[in-house]
Image: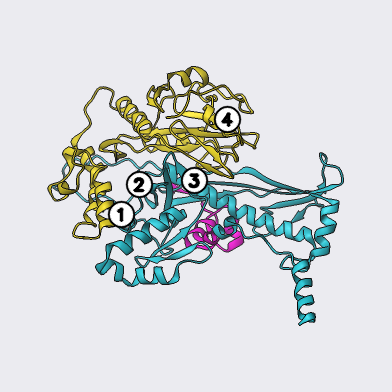
Chain colours: A yellow, B cyan
């Protein structure tokens, strides 16, 4: 678990409401070497029929649009907020995920990040480039020598996706057909391994099956499901 | 021997070679038929490479079936036709290098290797490379918003995931004459290799797997699978919080656009075809660094998802 975020530098341009910087974690600052590179800001969008299986849950398969001018329908002005790209996604039925969904990541509520930056799922880090680097809240970049590593809080990511699903459903139940559609490609991949006696393949098979919700594991894959299900 | 040694030593000392970088490897993908087809439909580059502009609108036509009706019955309600317009807006990109006069002198003195004698020419060449890197990087980044997925979050990439993702794309009717380009990072390629080797039986002995293992890849290109899917190993593939987000793309999946650049007569231009220049390159004295020449490469580019059916992301765990 990472340590509590500490104040650090500010991004080079004043962001509009909802796109401000969050403070980088002290683990990054304590590494002794400044992060390298540049990564644009971004937003997440979601659509109820785009779901994925992850860690035994059915969760939204988030679409990410980067604030890079010229990319995805962005104009020259879309360097802080990817309005052009988002507009093209919204025409396909996607909805922009609100900036204020609270969830627990790296062991603490993201509500504090909202107070700092106006967004719970993005963090900004200073780097050797003026524009710095934006990251998902559950991915915390740090320098290890000359290499940037990205430790991930997978539970934090799933917690965010669960909040997004709750927001999309707005109190309704997730339709069984949507769950089945999300499970189908995972089941197809898992079934390709059935019959193998190779320990490595069986290990992969179990890892794939572990992504399925326990009550949606078909009988032929049940022997490979995690025992604590 | 002494003479040979001296010659070798001289050659080594004076050789000026381009350093090996993975970015140079990555550009192998820009010559892929899918990328070539995309660029041929570019408003500005299309005329340069021989095809002509399209500003694309999608009409969902031809998917229905006729309904049985009786003669003289009331007219059926007709389905509305709503085009989806795709209009990537070119934006300016620039890349600049400052070259101190002393460095230029040193480099010119060494200019006997692979690079042209005039070191400025080397930076002109680099400008085209930068353009290639940028376009590829933009196209690869579109995968993060793809509506279709091959693979599974949090799990290594498998042969079955790649195969199913490709067959789903075929089933959507998205695969054209140019076939499909797919790109993942080296981790994804290793995942698939380990997968096929551990599966045994028919899959491991399949021709394409044998060819994959025998060929092993060169300059970013790994091999052709399922007869029509060309797989590349590219570092610029996007990531998203724990997963790599590779791309599977048919020719109608992306539309790019460039813009003709109005230039002063003194500017050095690379391409003048199809009605204008699409890369400008200027060498000028830097205003910020004394005694240096600044070489600026600029172009206007954009890329956007055209038909979502022809684009899938390839999802697999990063580590």
Q: Are marks 2 and 3 in contact (CB under 8 Å)?
A: no
Q: Residues within 10 Å of mark 2 (few under 14, many from 20)?
A: some
What subunit carries mark 1? B
Name the residue beneath numbered marker 2: B148
Where, by quadrant of the figure, is residue B273 drawn? bottom right
Callout in the foreground (3, 4): 4
- Which residue ends up furthest to the bottom in the rendered image? B1
Q: Position of residue B6 (x, y in %)?
A: 79, 76
Q: CA distance from mark 3 to mark 1?
A: 21 Å
Which disc number belongs to residue B141? 3
Q: Are marks 3 and 1 in contact (CB under 8 Å)?
A: no
Name the residue beneath numbered marker 4: A29
Report whether mark 1 lies on the same chain as mark 2.
Answer: yes
Q: Position of residue A33 (x, y in %)?
A: 61, 36
Q: Residues within 10 Å of mark 1 (few under 14, many from 20)?
A: some
Give the residues in magenta.
B28-57
Q: Are marks 4 and 2 in contact (CB under 8 Å)?
A: no
Name the residue beneath numbered marker 1: B168
Front in this rendered view, residue B292 or A224: A224
Callout in the foreground (1, 4): 4
Front in this rendered view, residue B1 or B305: B1
Q: Are marks 1 and 4 in contact (CB under 8 Å)?
A: no
Q: Is residue A117 left or right of residue A51?
A: right
Q: CA distance from mark 4 to mark 2?
A: 38 Å
What subunit carries mark 3? B
Which quarter of the figure is the N terminus of chain B placed in? bottom right
Q: CA distance from mark 1 to mark 2?
A: 9 Å
Image: B239 above or below B46:
above
Let me know if residue B36 is in the magenta part: yes
Callout in the foreground (4, 2): 4
What subunit carries mark 2? B
Q: Position of residue B278 (x, y in %)?
A: 66, 53
């Amino acid at each position: 678990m990472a340590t509590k975020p500490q104040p650090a530098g500010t991004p080079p341009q004043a962001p509009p409401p909802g796109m401000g910087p969050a403070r980088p974690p002290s683990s990054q600052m304590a590494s002794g070497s400044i992060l390298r590179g540049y990564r644009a800001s971004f937003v997440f969008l979601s659509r109820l029929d785009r779901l994925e299986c992850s860690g035994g849950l059915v969760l939204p398969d988030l679409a990410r649009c980067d604030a890079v001018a010229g990319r995805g329908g962005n104009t020259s002005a879309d360097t802080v907020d990817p309005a052009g790209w988002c507009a093209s996604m919204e025409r396909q039925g996607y909805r922009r995920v609100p900036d204020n969904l609270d969830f627990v990541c790296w062991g603490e509520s993201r509500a504090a990040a909202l107070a700092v930056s106006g967004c719970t799922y993005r963090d900004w880090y200073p780097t050797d480039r003026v524009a710095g680097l934006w990251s998902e809240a559950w991915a915390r970049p740090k320098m290890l020598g000359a290499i940037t590593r990205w430790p991930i809080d997978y539970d934090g990511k799933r917690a965010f996706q669960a909040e997004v699903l709750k927001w999309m459903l707005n109190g309704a139940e997730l339709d069984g057909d949507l769950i089945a559609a999300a499970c189908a490609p995972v089941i197809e991949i898992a079934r390709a391994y059935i019959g193998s006696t190779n320990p490595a393949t069986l290990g992969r098979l179990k890892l794939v099956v572990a992504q399925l919700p326990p009550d949606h594991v078909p009988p032929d894959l049940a022997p490979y499901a995690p025992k604590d299900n | 021997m002494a003479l040979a040694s001296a010659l070798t030593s001289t050659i080594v000392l004076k050789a000026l070679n381009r350093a090996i970088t993975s970015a140079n490897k990555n550009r192998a993908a820009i010559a892929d038929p899918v990328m070539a087809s995309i660029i041929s439909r570019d408003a500005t580059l299309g005329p340069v490479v021989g095809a002509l502009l399209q500003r694309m609108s999608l009409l969902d036509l031809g998917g229905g079936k006729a309904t049985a009706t009786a003669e003289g019955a009331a007219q059926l309600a007709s389905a509305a036709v709503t085009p989806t317009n795709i209009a990537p807006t070119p934006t300016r990109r620039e890349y600049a290098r400052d070259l101190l006069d002393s460095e230029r002198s040193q480099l010119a003195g060494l200019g006997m290797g692979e690079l042209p004698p005039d070191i400025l020419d080397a930076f002109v060449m680099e400008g085209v490379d930068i353009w290639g890197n940028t376009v590829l990087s933009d196209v690869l980044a579109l995968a993060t918003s793809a509506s279709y997925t091959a693979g599974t979050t949090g799990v290594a990439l498998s042969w079955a995931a790649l195969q199913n993702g490709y067959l789903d794309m075929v089933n959507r009717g998205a695969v054209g004459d140019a076939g499909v380009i797919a790109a993942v990072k080296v981790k994804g390629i290793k995942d698939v290799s380990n997968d096929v080797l551990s599966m045994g039986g028919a899959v491991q002995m399949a021709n394409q797997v044998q060819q994959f293992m025998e060929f092993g890849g060169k300059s970013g290109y790994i091999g052709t699978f399922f007869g029509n899917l060309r797989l590349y190993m590219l570092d610029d593939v996007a990531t998203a919080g724990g997963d790599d987000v590779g791309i599977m793309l048919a020719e109608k999946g992306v539309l790019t656009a460039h813009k003709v650049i109005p230039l002063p007569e003194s500017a050095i231009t690379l391409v003048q075809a199809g009605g204008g220049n699409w890369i400008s390159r200027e060498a000028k004295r830097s205003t910020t660094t004394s005694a240096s020449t600044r070489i600026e490469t600029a172009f206007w580019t954009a890329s956007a998802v055209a038909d979502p059916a022809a684009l899938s992301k390839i999802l697999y765990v990063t580590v």
